[in-house]
Image (cartoon, rainbow, N blue to C red):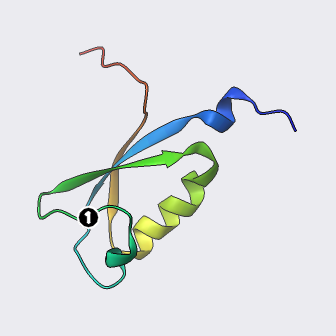
Amino acid sequence: MITSAKDNRVFVYEVSGLRQSDATDLNSYPIRNSSSIFVQVPFSRLNEQTRRITRLGGTIVDVRPLNSTSAD
C-alpha cells in the first residue's frame, strides 16, 4: 500500500458551542468553558469528525492545515 502526502495531512478545527456533557466526556480532550476549542483531525477522519462535532452541538468556525503559516 502506498501512502500519499495527503494521507498524512492533519487539520485543526476551531470549534465553538461545545459544552462538557456525558457525550463529550468520552473525548480524549477536555471541553473548556471558553468560546472555542481546537481539535487536530487527520485528513482521513475529516468527514467523520465534522459529523460528530455537529451532532454534539458544536459549530466549526475555522479549518486549517496544522502546518500552515499565517500571512497576517
Q: Which quadrant: the N terminus? A: top right
Total count of labels: 1
Q: Which quadrant: the C terminus? A: top left
Location of residue 18 by image quarter: bottom left
Q: Residue 7 in the image: state x and y as whole percent.
A: 67, 37
Q: Residue 6 in the image: state x and y as whole percent.
A: 66, 32
Location of residue 25 by image quarter: bottom left
Residue extending farthest to the bottom is 22
Residue extending farthest to the top is 71
34 sits to left or right of 49: left
Q: Is residue 2 above or below residue 45?
A: above
Disc 1 residue type (three-letter): Pro
SS under mark 1: loop
Q: In this view, does 31 lie above or below 71?
A: below
Q: Residue 56 in the image: state x and y as whole percent.
A: 37, 75
Q: Nearer the viewer, residue 25 or 12?
A: 25
Location of residue 20 by image quarter: bottom left
Name the residue: 32% across, 61% down.
29
Residue with the mark numbered 1 = 30
Q: Is residue 11 above or below residue 28?
A: above
Name the residue: 30% across, 14% down.
71
Name the residue: 47% across, 69% down.
52
Q: Residue 22 in the image: state x and y as whole percent.
A: 31, 85
Q: Nearer the viewer, residue 17 or 34?
A: 34
Q: How crowded is mark 1: few (under 14 residues within 10 Å), some or many (20 or more)?
A: few
Residue extending farthest to the right is 1
40 sits to left or right of 31: right
Q: In this view, does 25 lie above or below 36?
A: below
